[in-house]
């Protein structure tokens, strides 16, 4: 039997097709994003894998270097290896600038000081890795953007959020985790 993931193994969106690459998102990479659950470029724990694969528990995240002029933070988790025309946005959240991180499982609707917009698959909240079996390792990037203006409550989709923050990014940071299903 041929595994579909193996057939699509060379088909990947690529980081260069990310909506976060364009003008309006250029900013110093002065924010450091870390996790005690995995190192940058390292494998994410199985507990963080998505529904039906793992426990769908967001990993703990910490960050430093947020500029004092930050009005809000935006956290976007994307998969650059999905076999689609652009990376898939798994999680899109607006956070208050005073947060220095989130605990394991902290990225869920109803969490204090966190508001979610609808991500690419129509959900709100954390959606962990669920790569196609046999497709090889996928890279999940945890982008943290510091923005200089408040993001309106009426912004409910990832597309609208990206449009609202374009040109308002003061600083950014990224942590990359990998996940693979055999």
Image (cartoon, grey):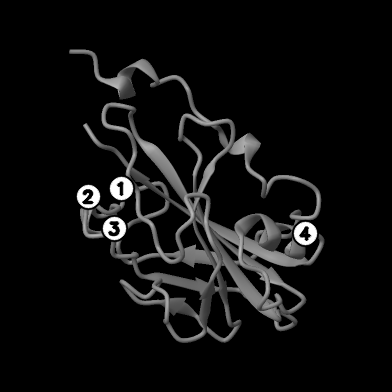
Q: Label 3 to label 1, Cα distance in Å? A: 10 Å
Residue at disc 3, secondary structure: helix
Q: Is residue 2 above or below residue 82?
A: above
Q: Say whether disc 2 or disc 1 marks the residue closer to the N-terminus.
A: 1
Q: Label 4 to label 2, Cα distance in Å? A: 35 Å
Judged left or right of residue 84, residue 108 is left
Q: Do callouts 4 and 1 mark residues in contact (Cβ within 8 Å)?
A: no
Which residue is pictured at 44% across the width and 19% down the height?
A: 10
Pick the residue in front: 125 or 149: 125
- Where residue 133 appears, as percent x and y from the top left, is 26, 31
**Label 2 belongs to which residue?**
52
Q: Do callouts 4 and 2 mark residues in contact (Cβ within 8 Å)?
A: no
**Label 4 belongs to which residue?**
166
Crowding around mark 4 (Cα neighbors within 10 Å: few <14, some 14 to 19, many 20+) is some
Residue 48's label in the rendered image is 3
- Where residue 162 appears, as percent x and y from the top left, is 69, 58
**Label 1 belongs to which residue?**
43
Residue at disc 2, secondary structure: loop
Q: Say whether disc 4 or disc 2 marks the residue closer to the N-terminus.
A: 2
Q: Label 4 to label 1, Cα distance in Å? A: 31 Å
Q: Label 2 to label 1, Cα distance in Å? A: 18 Å
Pick the residue in front: 147 or 28: 147
């Amino acid at each position: 039997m041929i595994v579909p993931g193996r057939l699509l193994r060379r088909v990947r969106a690529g980081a260069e097709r990310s909506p976060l690459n364009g003008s309006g998102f250029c900013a110093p990479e002065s924010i450091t994003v870390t996790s005690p659950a995995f190192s940058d470029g390292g494998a994410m724990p199985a507990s963080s894998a998505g529904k039906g694969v793992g426990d769908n528990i967001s990993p703990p995240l910490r960050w430093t270097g947020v500029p004092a002029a930050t009005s809000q933070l935006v956290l976007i988790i994307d998969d650059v290896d999905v076999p689609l025309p652009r990376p898939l946005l798994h999680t899109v959240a607006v956070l208050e600038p005073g947060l220095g991180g989130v605990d394991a499982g902290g990225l869920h609707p109803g969490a204090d000081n966190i508001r979610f917009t609808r991500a690419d698959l129509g959900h709100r909240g954390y959606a962990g890795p669920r790569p196609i079996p046999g497709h090889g390792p996928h890279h999940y990037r945890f982008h943290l953007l510091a923005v200089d203006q408040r993001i309106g409550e009426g912004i409910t989709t990832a597309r609208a959020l990206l449009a609202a923050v374009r040109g308002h990014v003061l600083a950014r940071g990224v942590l990359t985790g990998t996940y693979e299903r055999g």
